[in-house]
Image (spheres, grey):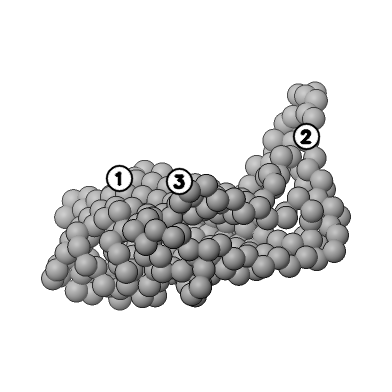
């Protein structure tokens, strides 16, 4: 639906521009495909067992998969591509490790010759790390349960991603920060991440924040979103308070949420989950299955 609205908006802009006799020079980004290449990735663990690795993943367009399983290395896996400029680079400076590609941003209209392939299939170890991901228009599948993440920061563009914490984190995570454009994003098992603060900022899109798992301490969540469909799921037995600030927004409530002014409350045992939602317009669904 949002893609259709975007295309309509672009069409209207083009018609108006022609009617006003504007001359618009739109740059073209060339993507010429060649032979498919698969490169093995193996980044050694840091020698100091007390050090925290700063891992930066800088990804353009394609598919990015992350999961546990790097037993002998800090990061391992494969990167498969068929565009020369997608060749990965691995750099290490002290405790900072960066895996990146040449600038793969699309500046203007893409001119694609052939079918582009750019797949990252990587595994992470359980060593302590701060994980930073910067991506463009891509598909992302993240399974980060059972790792030792001190912090997680994701910035992406028009994305279709699912991030899961299927197992409790090995350490307390200071923060999760997710910033996205017009996307479809699902965050699942967030209580298992054992975070102190979660910040989620988005444009127009379809978003689900699922706080299932074991909440081990008090946690705060700040959500800012534009024209979107937002689902917040908190499991039974969890203590939660959600404060809502919004414009033309429909709020749909299911389960045992109780409204109190602009707040919605769940009564439970254990730590408290405090959520603040700022929403331009759209639909907010509160679930308590």
Q: CA distance from mark 2 to mark 1?
A: 38 Å
Q: Residues within 10 Å of mark 3 (few under 14, many from 20)?
A: many
Q: Nearer the viewer, residue 165 or 17?
A: 165
Image point (49%, 60%), residue name: 185
User: Which is closer to the viewer, label 3 or label 2?
Assistant: 2
Q: Which mark is residue 226?
A: 3
According to the picture, the residue beneath numbered tag 2 turns out to be 26
Mark 3 touching mark 1, by CB under 8 A? no
Rendering quarter of residue 129: bottom left
Q: Is residue 140 visible?
A: no
Query: For the residue labelled by badge 1, is the local secondary structure a helix, a strand or a loop?
Result: strand
Q: Nearer the viewer, residue 68 or 42?
A: 42
Q: Position of residue 158 (x, y in %)?
A: 59, 52
Q: Position of residue 262 (x, y in %)?
A: 22, 50
User: Which is closer to the viewer, label 2 or label 1?
Assistant: 2
Give the quadrant of the C terminus: bottom left
Q: Is residue 228 placed above or below 126 in the rendered structure?
A: above
Q: Is residue 26 placed above or below 122 in the rendered structure?
A: above
Q: Is residue 153 left or right of residue 257?
A: right
Q: Which mark is residue 245?
A: 1
Q: Is residue 97 left or right of residue 169?
A: right
Q: Is residue 14 visible?
A: yes
Image point (16%, 64%), residue name: 271
Q: CA distance from mark 3 to mark 1?
A: 12 Å
Q: Position of residue 170 (x, y in %)?
A: 32, 69
Q: Which mark is residue 82?
A: none
Q: Nearer the viewer, residue 1 or 242?
A: 242
Query: For the residue labelled by badge 3, is the local secondary structure a helix, a strand or a loop?
Result: strand
Considering only order in the chain, which callout, 2 or 3, is on the residue closer to the N terminus? 2
Q: Nearer the viewer, residue 160 or 197?
A: 197
Image point (33%, 65%), residue name: 193
Q: Is residue 146 left or right of residue 272?
A: right
């Amino acid at each position: 639906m949002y893609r259709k609205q975007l295309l309509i908006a672009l069409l209207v802009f083009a018609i108006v521009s022609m009617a006003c006799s504007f001359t618009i020079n739109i740059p073209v980004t060339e993507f010429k495909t060649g032979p498919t290449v698969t490169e093995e990735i193996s980044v050694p663990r840091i020698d100091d067992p007390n050090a925290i690795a700063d891992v930066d993943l800088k990804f353009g367009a394609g598919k990015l998969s992350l999961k546990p399983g790097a037993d002998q290395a800090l990061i391992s896996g494969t990167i498969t591509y068929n565009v020369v400029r997608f060749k990965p680079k691995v750099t290490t400076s002290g405790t900072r490790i960066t895996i990146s590609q040449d600038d793969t941003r699309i500046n203007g209209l893409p001119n694609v010759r052939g079918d582009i392939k750019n797949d990252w299939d990587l595994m992470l170890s359980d060593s302590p790390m701060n994980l930073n991901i910067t991506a463009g228009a891509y598909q992302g599948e993240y399974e980060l349960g059972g790792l030792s993440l001190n912090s997680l920061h994701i910035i992406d563009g028009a994305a279709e991603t699912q991030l899961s914490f299927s197992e409790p984190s090995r350490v307390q995570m200071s923060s999760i920060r997710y910033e996205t454009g017009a996307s479809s994003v699902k965050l699942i098992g967030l209580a298992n991440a054992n975070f102190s603060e979660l910040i989620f900022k988005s444009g127009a899109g379809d978003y689900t924040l699922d706080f299932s798992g074991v909440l081990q301490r008090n946690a705060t969540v700040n959500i800012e979103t534009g024209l979107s469909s937002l689902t917040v799921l908190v499991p039974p037995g969890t203590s939660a308070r959600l404060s809502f600030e919004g414009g033309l927004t429909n709020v749909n409530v299911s389960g045992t949420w109780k409204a109190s002014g602009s707040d919605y409350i769940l009564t439970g045992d254990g730590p408290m989950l405090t959520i603040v939602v700022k929403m331009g317009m759209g639909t907010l669904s509160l679930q308590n299955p």
